[in-house]
């Protein structure tokens, strides 16, 4: 049972400061940035997020896991008995998300000071980053779905601004527009779902909805509709089939944007929203089944595509889609805390991988094709060591963070659905393959780029390498927060989140668990699969020194993989072009032949009517008197007849 705290001035102050400090950084940089010394915008933006993290840390140390703080800033909308407050709800789930958003967010801000140092839009970049952090904090702290939706739309706006940050490049603008439009599709589902919740529950307060949901358990169809609509929103924001294609294209933005928005925060918003609404989803098992299989298919599909990508950021982008699919698998299995566990560990190692990729790109002066890299491990050693440890973590190498969070989800899958377990083991195996294909092509053997580029290669400055080291420590040790029972240790994260995810457990049948010996066997199998994949890639790309074939020499299924199975082309030909043609037809035919004619006919009719009425307004007094007399006589006759 959660104890609600409402009148603690210290906690209220800290809670308000968490979103207000990044907002203050946004306002200072946005309004005064051009008057400040060059480079100061980066430190202002970074310190504001660091201060927010300190407030989060103080609250984390003060609040017990079974306590929550409610902060009602003001009564926003009041209509009779219905009201919506502008307020925050900070419980165990919120605290975990706040630690990730502000902690990882600060490290990415600090890294960006070095990465964006010479960019002409330096101040504008940090202005957008601070605004993004503010909206993400609103999303996870909102006490009702409307507050969550404000943050939801806000991060979508900031994503558009940051993906298209280099707006002079037309393809980057196209990528930003694609992300914006595809997210609007999902957002429409979320919005309609909110209307359903408001109509049937009479409130948008998340805690009130959760408490009232069991009373509507008999209306399974209604709950399925609501949860499916919410899931559509999550599908768009968290890049699941079929609304995933915006995320790989979003790599057009600066690399820190990829780390912040598309690895650690925004794309996890859909995961957070479903876990926050866990009681609703627990009462809609059919929806959970859909969530499960969408996650399974997304994880496998994206992993297969990642095998043949040669852009260092595109490999990581499809890896993100695949890992998000794994999180949705956890949610579909009803293992909500396991989904959050992998969300946290993924934030550590994926942010590190993107920042490491940015360090490589920085060292190579913009080069992103892994076929033109190689031999970098001695030239940029800090980047190499941190990158390879992050790759081991995401691959599920034994005892690193990803090993524990992945194993937990795979154990739930083995217990509930063996087919799901098989598919996810294959997906995890492919993860190790494409990640170490990337590692060995980038850091091993001889450099394959130009001589002029080779002479300029250097390690990144400390403001870039320091975040790499901190994230590397977290990627290695992050699994300690969720050690399995077979290690004779308490699963801290599961216990910490129990007050949030516990109420849904009674509606979900989790089975009887698996034995310790079987769990050890599954862990050994998963770890061995990762090691086999790594060794396979080592033999192919280090010992045999294989180089990915050119696009011209690819054929059949391999060519389809390299071209992302032509999903974008399918959308272009099946949806975009027909829509444009239909719009052109309406513009050229329907608009001119129907709409314009109706407007013209209306105008001519009014003109003709006016000309006719003018005949009765000649100014002759005798005519007016005669009309009055005739009118009186007609009315008199009508009255007699009636």
Image (cartoon, grey):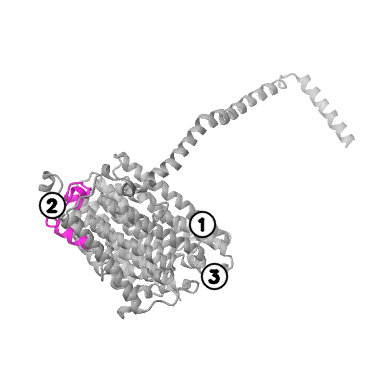
Tell me which label, 3 or 2, sits earlier in the chain: 3
Q: In this figure, which residue is indicated by the disc labeled 2?
A: 446
- The image position of residue 245, as x and y in percent, is 37, 49
Identify which residue, 156 or 244, lies in the foreground: 244
Residue 503: mark:
none
Give the residue number, with chain letter if any, for mark 3: 214
Most foreground residue, 485 or 157: 485
Residue 119 on image: x %, y %: 22, 45
For residue 451, which quarter of the picture?
A: top left
What residue is shown at x 30% (from left), y 46% (from top)? 252
* Residue at disc 2, secondary structure: loop
- Which quadrant is the C terminus positioned in? top right
Q: In the rendered image, is residue 14 in sight?
A: no
Is residue 361 one of those drawn in magenta? yes
Residue 394 lies in the magenta-colored region: no
**Disc nearest the viewer among 3 and 2:** 2
Residue 160, placed above or below residue 416: above
Residue span colored magenta? 360-388
Q: Earlier in the sequence, mark 1 or mark 3?
A: 1
In which image quadrant can residue 53 be found? bottom left
- The residue most toward the bottom is 488
Helix, strand or loop at label 3? It is helix
Neighbor class of circle 3 (other Cα within 10 Å; few <14, some 14-19, many 20+) is some
Q: Are marks 1 and 3 in contact (CB under 8 Å)?
A: no
Query: Which residue has dot 1 on it?
Result: 193
Q: CA distance from mark 1 to mark 3?
A: 18 Å
Cα separation, mark 1 vs mark 2, equals 55 Å
**What kind of element bears circle 1?**
helix
Q: Kindly report which numbered mark, 1 or 2, lies closer to the viewer in this rendering.
A: 2
On the image, the x and y values in percent for residue 27 come to 32, 52
Q: CA distance from mark 3 to mark 2?
A: 62 Å
């Amino acid at each position: 049972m959660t104890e609600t705290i409402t009148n603690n001035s210290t906690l209220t102050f800290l809670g308000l400061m968490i979103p207000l400090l990044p907002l203050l950084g946004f306002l200072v940089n946005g309004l005064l940035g051009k008057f400040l010394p060059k480079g100061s915008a980066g430190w202002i933006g970074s310190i504001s997020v660091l201060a927010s993290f300190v407030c989060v840390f103080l609250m984390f140390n003060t609040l017990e896991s079974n306590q929550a703080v409610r902060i009602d800033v003001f009564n926003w909308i009041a209509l009779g008995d219905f009201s919506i407050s502008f307020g925050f709800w900070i419980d165990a789930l919120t605290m975990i998300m706040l630690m990730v958003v502000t902690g990882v967010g600060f490290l990415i801000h600090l890294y960006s000071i070095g990465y964006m140092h010479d960019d002409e839009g330096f101040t504008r970049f940090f202005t957008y980053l601070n605004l993004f952090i503010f909206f993400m904090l609103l999303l996870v702290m909102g006490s009702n779905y409307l507050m969550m939706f404000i943050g939801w739309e806000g991060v979508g706006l900031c994503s558009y601004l940051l993906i298209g940050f280099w707006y002079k490049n037309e393809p980057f603008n196209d990528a930003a527009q694609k992300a914006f439009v595809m997210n609007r599709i999902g957002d429409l589902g979320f919005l309609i779902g909110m209307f359903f919740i408001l109509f049937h529950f009479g409130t948008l307060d998340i805690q009130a909805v959760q408490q009232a949901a069991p009373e509507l358990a008999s209306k399974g169809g209604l709950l399925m509709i609501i949860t499916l609509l919410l899931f559509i929103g999550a599908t768009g924001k968290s890049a699941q089939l079929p609304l995933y294609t915006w995320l790989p294209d979003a790599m057009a933005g600066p690399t820190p944007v990829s780390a912040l928005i598309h690895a650690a925060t925004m794309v996890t918003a859909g995961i957070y929203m479903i876990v926050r609404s866990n009681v609703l989803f627990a009462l809609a098992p059919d929806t959970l089944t859909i969530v499960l299989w969408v996650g399974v298919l997304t994880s496998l599909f994206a992993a297969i595509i990642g095998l043949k990508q040669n852009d260092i950021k595109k490999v990581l982008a499809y890896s993100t889609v695949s890992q998000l699919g794994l999180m949705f698998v956890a949610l579909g299995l009803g293992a909500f805390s396991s989904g959050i566990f992998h969300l946290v560990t993924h934030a550590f190692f994926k942010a590190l991988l993107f920042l490491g990729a940015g360090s490589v790109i920085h060292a190579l002066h913009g080069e992103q094709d892994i076929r033109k890299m190689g031999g970098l491990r001695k030239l940029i050693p800090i980047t190499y060591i941190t990158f390879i440890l992050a790759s081991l973590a995401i691959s599920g190498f034994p005892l690193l963070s990803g090993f524990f969070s992945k194993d937990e989800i795979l154990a739930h899958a083995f217990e509930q659905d063996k087919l799901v377990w098989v598919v996810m083991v294959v997906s995890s195996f492919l993860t190790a393959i494409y990640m170490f294909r990337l590692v060995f092509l980038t850091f091993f053997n001889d450099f394959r780029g130009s001589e002029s580029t080779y002479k300029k290669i250097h390690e990144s400055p400390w403001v870039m390498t320091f975040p790499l080291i901190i994230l590397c420590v977290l990627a290695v040790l992050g699994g300690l927060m969720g050690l399995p029972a077979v290690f004779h240790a308490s699963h801290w994260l599961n216990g910490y989140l129990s007050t949030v995810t516990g109420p849904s457990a009674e509606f979900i049948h989790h089975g009887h668990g698996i034995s310790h010996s079987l769990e050890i066997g599954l862990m050994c199998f998963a770890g061995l699969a990762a090691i086999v994949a790594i060794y396979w890639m080592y033999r192919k790309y280090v010992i045999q020194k294989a180089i990915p074939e050119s696009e011209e020499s690819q054929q059949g299924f391999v060519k389809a993989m390299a071209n992302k199975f032509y999903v974008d082309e399918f959308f272009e030909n099946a949806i975009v072009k027909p829509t444009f043609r239909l719009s052109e037809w309406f513009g050229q035919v329907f608009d001119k032949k129907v709409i314009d004619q109706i407007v013209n006919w209306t105008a001519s009719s009014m003109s003709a009517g006016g000309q006719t009425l003018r005949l009765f307004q000649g100014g002759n007094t005798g005519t007016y008197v005669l009309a009055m007399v005739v009118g009186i006589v007609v009315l008199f006759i009508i009255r007699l007849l009636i």
